[in-house]
Amino acid sequence: MIIRSGLFRALKNSVSPVDMASCEMMDVMRGEETETIGVISLFDITGPALVILPGSHSKFVKLDNNNNIVSSATTIAGELLSVVTQNTILANSLDHQFTNIIDQEYLLQGAKLCREVGLARSCFSVRILDLFSQTTLNQRANFLLGTILYSDILTIKNSQALACEPDSTIVICGKKNFKRSVRNTY
C-alpha cells in the first residue's frame, strides 16, 4: 500500500490497527522498493524471495511468487554497529574502527555468543577480549559485527512481517565487505 502525507511517500505493510500486539508486523519503505526492483531485474529473481539490503537501516523485503513486494522489515543494525563502535565503552577496545577484513571465525563466534547470552552481554565481551586476550583489533571488530548481525538473523527467522517460506530464494545486496559479513553470518 502507498501512503502519502505531504512530501512523505512510502510503501507500508498492511497492518491495521497498529498496536502493541501488531506493531512488529508494521514497516515502511521509502526508496528501497526501487532498489529491490533493480535487484529483481539484474539477477532475474523469481519469488518467493527475500531481498536483504544491509546498511545503516537494514531492510528485508519479502517477494511473493509473482515478484510483488508483499512486506518488509527494517532493523537499525548498521546504526547500532556505529554507535557501539564510536560512542560506548567499547570504542577504546575497537579504536573507534570497524572491521576492515572479514574474519569468519570471530564473526561466527560473536553470532554464537549473541544467540547464547543476548546482544548486550555479547557486545560487552568485546571489552573482555580486549582486556584479557591476545585478539587483534580486527578480530574484536568482527566479533562485534557478528553479535549485531545475529540480531538480524532473529528478524529473518521470527518476524511476523516477513513470515518467510523455507524455499524462498535469499538475495543479499550492498557494499562488498558488509555483504560478505552478512552472507558469512547467515
Image (tube, rainbow, N blue to C red):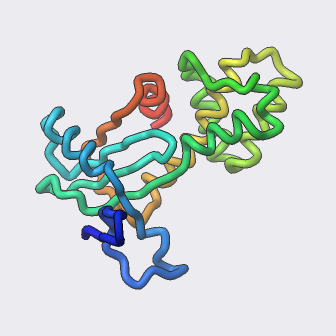
> Which residue is located at x 38 percent, y 32 percent?
174
Q: Is residue 108 above or below residue 157?
A: above
Q: Is residue 40 left or right of residue 160?
A: left
Q: Residue furthest bottom?
A: 17
Residue 99 falls in which quadrant of the image? top right
Instruction: Depth check: give the residue in front, 9 or 33.
Output: 9
Instruction: Depth check: give the residue in front, 26 or 10.
Output: 10
Residue 137 falls in which quadrant of the image? top right
Q: Is residue 106 above or below residue 90?
A: above
Q: Quadrant of the N terminus?
A: bottom left
Q: Residue furthest right?
A: 131
> Which residue is located at x 54 percent, y 79 percent?
20
Across and down, in percent, residue 51 comes to 31, 45
Q: Is residue 91 above or below residue 74?
A: above
> Which residue is located at x 32 percent, y 48 percent?
32
Q: Is residue 146 left or right of residue 182?
A: right
Residue 161 falls in which quadrant of the image? bottom left
Q: Is residue 20 above or below residue 139?
A: below
Across and down, in percent, residue 107 comes to 59, 28
Q: Residue furthest front?
A: 6
Q: Is residue 160 left or right of residue 80?
A: left
Across and down, in percent, residue 132 comes to 88, 23
Q: Quadrant of the C terminus?
A: top left
Q: Is residue 179 left or right of residue 116?
A: left
Q: How many marks?
A: 0
Across and down, in percent, residue 22 comes to 46, 77
